[in-house]
Image: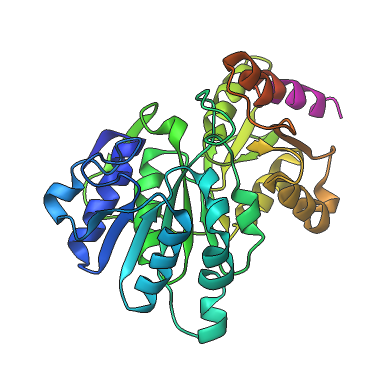
């Protein structure tokens, strides 16, 4: 049975289900127990599972990641929370050098799911708003997930926790209490590495993930008034990447906009654009357009952050230009 659920509550439900299913699953992070984390996602879980399986940590991301690696080696299934994904920079060595390479070096599984609230549009500045996903897609051995809906957040998180490899789960904090959608009760999974056609169209493929999926939906409605019908491809997972779904959409529309919240320069959109150019050159009807944030630190001032982020108008203007080819 489906019922409307907030994005944050869908994540909490996935955690609770996995902790009931497997006693080896435990969660830990800064203020996640009684306080429930900065965004309240884990609030109440300590009452059901106790302080041993829902545990506060010191303010040290490198210690959190170090514990995660050690616990997974010992046979547990750790699900650490990094309070803001921006702080992953202080935990790079245990994540990139140890966790990501473990299977290649040792040959055994290392099941860790790192939950990391990501993204901006909340006027909380440069230390709490960055989108760093493209840094980690560059690292062999890491899976990278960016859910855009409550339904996918629950199903993808369950899949991530059951995966035998390290998974970075970039939650969109802007969406925690901003969106609700129909979420099934009980256990279900959304497979890692499978994109979703969020909205069908015939003229342009808008390839995106995370919060910008909702920007693409708004732009699509405006474009329909001009008889431009965009198809939205929600990637869901950046590593592994579902190239087949992307290429199938592109071969239908022959035009593509790659949209993300991270800065355009060296963003994940460059990988998508290069892949389409290399593997679908004969399907190109127009240049592939990338839309991302400006190349500058994330501003705190609301007006400046609005200037920094991609806008609906950026998307509709790019789409109209593409249709002129």
**Relative to 31, is 195 on the left or the right?**
right
Nearer to us in this view, 54 or 167: 54
Q: Position of residue 214 (x, y in %)?
A: 52, 29
**Relative to 291, is 178 on the left or the right?**
left
**Relative to 37, is 220 on the left or the right?**
right
Residue at figure coordinates x 73%, y 52% from the top left: 271
What secondary structure do most residues of the magenta stretch adopt? Answer: helix
Q: Quadrant of residue 209?
A: top right
Q: Position of residue 113 (x, y in %)?
A: 41, 60
Q: Give the range drawn in magenta.
A: 315-325
Nearer to us in this view, 50 or 316: 50
**Residue 319 on the magenta span:** yes
Q: Is residue 223 visible?
A: no
- Residue 17, above or below 179: below
Q: Can residue 179 be seen in this view?
A: yes
Q: Quadrant of the C terminus?
A: top right
**Residue 212 on the magenta span:** no
Q: In which quarter of the image is the N terminus?
A: top left
Q: In which quarter of the image is residue 318?
A: top right
């Amino acid at each position: 049975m489906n019922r409307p659920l907030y994005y944050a509550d869908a994540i909490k439900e996935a955690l609770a289900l996995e902790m009931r299913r497997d006693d080896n699953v435990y969660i830990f992070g800064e203020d996640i127990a009684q306080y429930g984390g900065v965004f309240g996602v884990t609030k109440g879980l300590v009452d059901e599972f106790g302080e041993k399986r829902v545990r506060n940590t010191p303010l040290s991301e490198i210690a959190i990641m170090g514990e995660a690696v050690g616990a997974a080696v010992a046979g547990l299934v750790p699900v650490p929370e990094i309070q803001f994904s921006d702080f992953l920079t202080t935990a790079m060595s245990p994540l990139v050098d140890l966790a990501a390479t473990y299977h290649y070096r040792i040959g055994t599984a290392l099941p860790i799911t790192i939950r990391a609230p990501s993204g901006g549009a909340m006027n909380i500045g440069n230390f709490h708003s960055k989108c760093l996903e493209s840094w980690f897609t560059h690292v062999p051995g890491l899976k990278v997930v960016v859910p855009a809906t409550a339904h996918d957040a629950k199903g993808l998180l369950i899949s991530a926790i059951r995966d035998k490899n390290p998974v970075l789960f970039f939650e969109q904090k802007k969406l925690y209490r901003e969106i609700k959608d129909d979420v099934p009760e009980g256990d279900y999974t959304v497979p890692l590495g499978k994109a979703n056609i969020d909205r069908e169209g015939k003229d342009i493929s808008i390839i995106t993930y995370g919060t910008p999926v909702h920007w693409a939906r708004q732009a699509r409605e405006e474009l329909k008034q001009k008889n431009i019908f965009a198809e939205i491809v929600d990637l869901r997972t950046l590593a592994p990447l579902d190239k087949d779904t992307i290429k199938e959409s592109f071969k239908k529309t022959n035009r593509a906009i790659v949209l993300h919240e991270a800065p355009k320069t060296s963003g994940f959109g460059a990988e998508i654009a290069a892949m389409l150019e290399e593997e679908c050159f004969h399907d190109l009807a127009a240049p592939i357009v990338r839309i991302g944030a400006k190349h500058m630190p994330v501003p705190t001032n609301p007006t400046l952050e609005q200037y920094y982020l991609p806008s609906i108008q950026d998307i509709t203007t790019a789409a109209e230009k593409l249709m002129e080819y």
